[in-house]
Image (cartoon, rainbow, N blue to C red):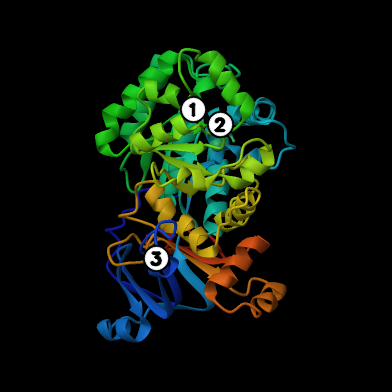
């Protein structure tokens, strides 16, 4: 077993550089004019030390400030961006991704619950976590907000693997004490909350790890479990804890919530009533949302994860980002893969799907907006915009390197596009599986497509 106690500060202070074409965002292209929103450096240099970005700018300017910097990875025919941010996914569904579809509730019963039941076995959980992280890093994702499942083993296996890479991740025990098989059901509301609190105290702010109180969704929790979960969330909110759940994804799900909670005015009102909505609440889907519900989400400062490939796969609701960001009551949103209803682990591929979902409703999503959502927008949705999602001094050095020649055909096709954003749009649309060349996590190159050992743990790498 590899040592999981990585300390970013302990290993030394060597300077490390990354040179190439760089894009990073300063503001939100949904509310500002596009050209003000990002910095583009055709030949830029990033300087990193102890896992943090210390300098960035045009190569010729930055190198004169760091005459001793000799360890530089140079990328041609590539775009260097902040690492991608996945605002909602389930690592425990990696073993059943792509299972023949059905409606949400049938799909949960038929495929999801039996698979998640297997995570009581720590070895199965560890193998799944290992595969999940390898996929994420291969696709340039450096932070994700991730559902585990009922069992302590599923949470420990996830955070242990994250510690090995030194990734900044959010996860937590899933709370679910009714309407699912006994093999997955919490034995009592009180015990489930007490276990969640223990895991919170074990993992929250350990290294870069962050904890989320995670009721699966209203139908699989008793009112008592929701009440205690709300109290737990509110108690630890000052320490930056999250609340992560699903909301308003499918019509029959909403109908079921109405039957289970007839006294509440809406699905969102159920969560609000139990104290589960706050500034770090992340609600997956929000496809079928009334005005009253958008207003509650806005008032509580919640954010939403848009999971386009999942919504297309399960074929029910579709997220309308223009509704979410309505000027009178804007709600932040980011992008989620939602594996295993989502059909792949790639944020760039989700962007291609998000464009098509918007187009089905006579809206669009351009490459500037898309790349923002994948980076700084995702960080903002997760309230981590002061730490990740930007390439600027003081930020954690989480970086992806997008290949502009991922295949013979793509290279030829991109030769007919002029601007860098035109090229990125084509790549998002083609949805190739190998557009990421390398991934840096806290300054270490943990994934390199051209290396013999493509994935390396932080413990196996020097700065
Ligand atoms: N709603 C409740 N649980 C789930 C899940 O595992 N996946 C999706 N897509 N929706 C859910
Ligand atoms: Zn989900």
Q: Quadrant of residue 352?
A: bottom right
The residue drawn where x is 33% and y is 29% is: 233
Q: Position of residue 381 (x, y in %)?
A: 40, 47
Disc number at residue 151? 1
Spot occupied by residue 127 in the image (x, y as percentages of width and height):
57, 42
Front-most of 274 and 209? 274
Crowd class of label 1 (few under 14; some 14 to 19; many from 20; radius 10 Å): many
The residue at the point 31 percent across, 84 percent down is 61
Task: From the viewer's perspective, tell me whether residue 226 is left or right of residue 351.
Answer: left
* Marks 1, 3: nearer the viewer: 3
Quadrant for the C terminus, please.
Answer: bottom left
- Residue 124 is at least partly visible in this image: yes
Say if mark 2 contacts mark 1, CB within 8 Å. yes
- The residue identified by callout 2 is 119
Q: Which mark is residue 415?
A: none
Q: Secondary structure at mark 3?
A: loop
Position of 69 relative to 422 (above/below): below
Q: CA distance from mark 3 to mark 2?
A: 43 Å
């Amino acid at each position: 077993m590899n040592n999981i106690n990585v300390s970013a500060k302990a290993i030394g202070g060597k300077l490390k550089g990354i040179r190439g074409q760089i894009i990073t965002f300063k503001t939100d292209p949904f509310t500002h004019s596009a050209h003000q929103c990002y910095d583009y450096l055709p030949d830029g240099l990033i300087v990193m030390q102890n896992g943090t970005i210390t300098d960035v700018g045009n190569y010729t300017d930055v190198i004169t400030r760091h005459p001793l910097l000799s360890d530089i990875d140079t990328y041609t025919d590539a775009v260097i961006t902040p690492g991608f941010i996945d605002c909602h996914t389930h690592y425990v569904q990696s073993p059943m991704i792509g299972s023949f579809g059905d409606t949400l509730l049938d799909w949960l019963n038929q495929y999801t619950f039996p698979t998640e039941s297997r995570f009581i076995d720590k070895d199965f959980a560890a193998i799944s976590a290992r595969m999940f992280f390898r996929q994420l890093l291969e696709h340039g994702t450096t932070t994700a907000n991730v559902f585990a499942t009922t069992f302590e083993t599923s949470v420990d296996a996830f955070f242990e693997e994250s510690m090995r890479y030194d990734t900044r991740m959010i996860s937590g025990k899933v709370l679910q004490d009714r309407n699912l098989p006994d093999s997955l059901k919490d034995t009592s509301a009180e015990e489930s909350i007490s276990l969640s609190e223990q895991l919170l105290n074990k993992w929250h702010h350990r290294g870069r790890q962050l904890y989320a109180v995670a009721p699966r969704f209203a139908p699989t929790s008793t009112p008592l479990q929701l009440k205690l979960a709300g109290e737990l969330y509110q108690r630890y909110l000052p320490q930056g804890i999250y609340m992560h759940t699903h909301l308003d994804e499918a019509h029959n799900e909403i109908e079921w919530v109405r039957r289970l909670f007839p006294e509440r005015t809406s699905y969102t009102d159920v969560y609000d009533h139990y104290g589960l909505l706050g500034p770090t609440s992340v609600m997956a889907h929000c496809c079928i949302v009334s005005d009253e519900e958008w207003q509650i989400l806005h008032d509580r400062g919640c954010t939403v994860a848009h999971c386009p490939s999942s919504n297309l796969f399960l074929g029910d609701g579709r997220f309308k980002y223009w509704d979410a960001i309505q000027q009178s009551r804007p709600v932040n949103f980011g992008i989620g893969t939602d594996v295993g209803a989502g059909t792949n682990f790639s944020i760039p591929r989700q962007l291609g799907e998000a464009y098509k979902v918007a187009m089905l409703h006579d809206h669009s999503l351009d490459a500037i907006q898309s790349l923002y959502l994948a980076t700084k927008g995702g960080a903002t949705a997760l309230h981590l915009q002061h730490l990740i999602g930007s390439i600027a001094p003081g930020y954690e050095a989480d970086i992806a390197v997008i290949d502009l020649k991922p295949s013979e055909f793509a290279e030829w096709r991109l030769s007919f596009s002029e601007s860098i954003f035109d090229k990125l749009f084509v790549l998002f649309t083609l949805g190739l599986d190998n557009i990421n060349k390398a991934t840096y996590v806290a300054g270490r190159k943990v994934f390199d497509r051209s290396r013999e050992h493509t994935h390396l743990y932080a413990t196996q790498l020097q700065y």
